Image (spheres, rainbow, N blue to C red):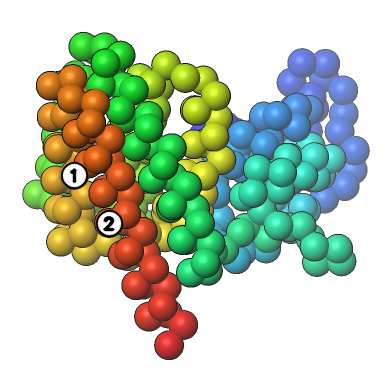
Amino acid sequence: MIVYNNPDGNDRQTGAPQPADATRGAVRVSSAEVYAEIRRLILSGVFRPGERLIEESVAQRLGVSRTPVRQALTMLEAEGLVEIVRHRGATVCAFGVDDVWSLYDLRAVLEAHAAGRAATRISAAELERMRALADEMERLEEQPLASREDEVRWLVTHNQEFHQIVIQASRNPHLEKLVRRTVEVPLMFKSFFWYSARERAVSNHFHRMILRALEERDAARAEFVMREHIYEGRDFVIQKLREELR
């Protein structure tokens, strides 16, 4: 986590005093840095779906001025992670049943295609890392973390890395960009929060099947299993969303 706070109230590089406002003690950072940190907080579930992101509060939390926060929120809106409404400000995007259908269907097409390509392009080092991730996610059932939220954040991070390796192994940078827009959303955090031991076991099983298909360089199998993995997740999330609406 990036820490921006500077206790003496001066710019770390220039020593210039900061404005005497609500973000006194902030240091000068680029909007890109603030964007990256807010994005991390959203994707890790610290900022929850539907939560309002008040510029002043976010600026104080990060120890920066409001200007880069405002710019960062605009960038996040373009990416689909926040919604900005006039006179209300920014809110972390939440998703309904129709959104889940659309996002997961698109994700299934893109990630299945990526898995098929990856089967003939993935490196030995990438396969080794995927094996290690699969092992670690399975061991979590035997060695749980201190809190539910810690476990969810841990799972989201490891699951993202597992899938990201497949995307990168497709060796198609344009595909990577498209997947990034459809996968890295707060919905992922919420789905893992809902997961019971059974759903985790199912997810781990799919990961093993995907890994096996990639190891065997079976493009058709890798594509098929990845698609089924995404659809399994979609059906579970839709079921839970409908239960919440009852």
Near mark 2 (Cα within 10 A), the count class, few <14, some 14-19 or many ≥20, is some
Say what amino acid the circle numbered 2 marks: Glu
43 is higher (above) or lower (below) than 48: above
Q: Are marks 1 and 2 in contact (CB under 8 Å)?
A: yes
Q: Residue placed at 27% from the left, 56% from the top?
A: 232
Say what amino acid the circle numbered 1 marks: Phe
Per the rendering, the mark at residue 121 is none
Where is mark 1, residue-wise? 206
Q: Residue placed at 70% from the left, 29% from the top?
A: 32
Does the rendering let one see residue 185? yes
Q: Nearer the viewer, residue 68 or 132?
A: 132
Q: Nearer the viewer, residue 101 or 144?
A: 101
**Picture coordinates of residue 53, whole percent (x, y):** 69, 57
Q: Nearer the viewer, residue 212 or 162?
A: 212
Instruction: Work out whether mark 1 precedes mark 2 in sequence or the reverse, and give the earlier one.
Output: 1
Q: Quadrant of residue 174?
A: top right
Count of numbered badges drawn on the protein: 2
Q: Residue placed at 25% from the left, 21% from the top?
A: 119
Secondary structure found at label 2: helix
Please identify the residue farthest to the right as the structure is shown: 19
Where is mark 2, residue-wise? 232
Please identify the residue farthest to the left as the structure is shown: 142
